[in-house]
Image (cartoon, rainbow, N blue to C red):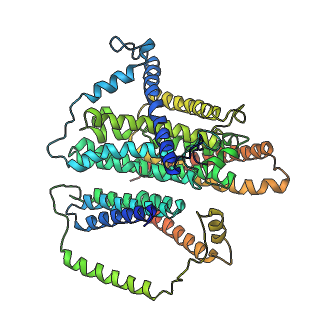
Amino acid sequence: MPVSQVVFLAVGALALGAAVRVVMSHRVFHAALWLIGSFFGVAALYMLLESPFMAGIQLFLYIGGVAVLTVIAIMVTKGGMRPDRRSTNDPWSSAVVAVALFAVMVWMIIQLPLPAEPASQVHGESLHLLGAALVDPEGYLLPFEVVSVMLLIVLIGSLYLGRER
Amino acid sequence: MDVVPGGSTPIPAFLLRLLGAFAMALVPLVLILFLIWESRKVIGRMQDRLGPTNAGTYAGPFALFQTFADGIKILTKELIIPDGADRPVFIAAPILVVTVAIAVWAVIPLGPAGLQVVDLDVGAFYVVAMSSLAPFSMIMAGWSSRNKYAEVGAFRAVSQIVSYEIPQVLALLAPVLLTGSLSLQNIIQAQSVPYIVAVPLAALIYFLASAAEVGRLPFELAEADSEIVAGFFTEYSGMMFGAFYLAEFINNLTAAVVFAILFLGGWRGPWVDQVPMLGAVWLLLKAFLVFNVLLLFWAAMPRLRIDQVLGFNWKFLVPLGMVVLLAVALVDKLLPLVGLTDPWPRSLGLLLANMVLGLGVVGVLSWMGRRAQRRIVRREVAP
């Protein structure tokens, strides 16, 4: 096994281990910290797959966005930061939901006809190609614009809800 | 791109990379030893003091070795971990804060090709992504200390950094847009005219936002020593405190270096073509200039309240940043249509657009502010 594969598997195992700790932690704040560790592991995986852009997005959106929001939500919840409080309740029903979701996802991935060979040999990535594809009518222009309009609606909606009356 | 192999015996590439990374990590650490002394001296002078003058027998001229003496002293201090603290998190926080501070330097180009650990395609983005990790070390420190002051400091740090990230990214997009690349090396190469001439508004926004991001006065809410002791690192002692102190200075230096790269032309300067190493000197000189402006802020500014800091961000910097970004994109597309493609005319055209825009935005905002003020006054008088 080449070194890069060993490193890849090791980093993957770390990310997975952190993810397991997210679920097993009794304190919700510890769970949030492990979640960050797990996100970080995934970013490292992207980096090993020669996609620094995806790694950057992972760091910026998931750690800088999702994880920060999670921590803020914990901070403003009453008693959420209290270290002496067990903040998990009924793990079993959550486990059932999680296993069901996982099964559905695995089933969907198995259904996909994945090519046995890589479609094209690409080393690194081309931001220019990605950018062009996003604004190309033949490419992903429509979904891109739909998403941006949706985000705009969300922004205006939150401003409307939060405005001074 | 990477470190150039020297000598006849081939050294494994990954070992060279490791050495390069290690050398690069030492750059901010060594510079900071000098910069801490310099800022103490400068701030001392600004406050009508002498600053450090001697540290025992071996202080050297002008107490140059003060920082070494402080460093050795702080290493001998006991590390006190509070009784109720969450030990692993408490210990991990100072490690994380220094790691993140140094990790940014991986993409800093000290000179033309070769003097950089790795020229990422997305260098500018990497810088932002790394700085978005910073609040976590503060949350971890503040939360694990089990101290009310620490927790208040952490809350403030998070709200401030998360808010100021938005104008920072908006302002950063202006040079990226003008270059057409996220690589810091390409951004520098495109600046035959420094971008601060073309997009001064974006530069101003970036400067203020990064001052807030590194927690420099007047945005020093997270550790406001007269209100909440020392904020999120109240409970830290010895070298763990030293780590926060070090990371704070490294972050200041990094902010200055990144500003110099994005808006002041990075390593560009005379004779760099002949002597590539000179690039590092130019870059650090420019960064030193920016660092000293930050110092000036530190010594001269009062501390704002947290609502003022956040209001300034959301009501002024964010709208301004969005308008600047739109205007830069539009004007940059329009200028070639009227035949202005050379660097200087292009920059001056953009500069003109920036000035009109700046005056316009300030005018509109102050008008809206006055209107809101009147409405509040009326409401308070009427019922």
Q: Is residue B65 visible?
A: yes
Residue drawn at 39 percent across, 61 percent down:
A41
User: Residue A162: in sight, yes or no?
Assistant: no
Where is residue B114 drawn, in percent x and y? 61, 43
Q: Nearer the viewer, residue B326 or B61?
A: B61
Q: Residue B62's spot in the image, x, y percent?
A: 44, 13
- Figure check: B247 above or below A123: above
In front here: B209 or B267? B267
View extreme (front): residue: B9
Residue located at (64% from left, 74% from top): A141
B82 or B154: nearer the eye?
B82
Q: Position of residue B4 (x, y in %)?
A: 60, 44
Left or right: A131, with A23 as reference point: right
Residue B108 falls left or right of residue A72: right
Query: As drawn, which residue projects farthest toward the right?
Result: B339
Count of numbered tags: 0
Q: Nearer the viewer, residue B220 or B37?
A: B37
| Image coords of residue B231 (percent x, y) | 30, 39
In the image, what residue occupies the spot 43% across and 86% down?
A: A110
Above or below, comparing residue B64 to residue B32 in the picture: above
The residue depicted at 32 percent of the width and 58 percent of the height is A71
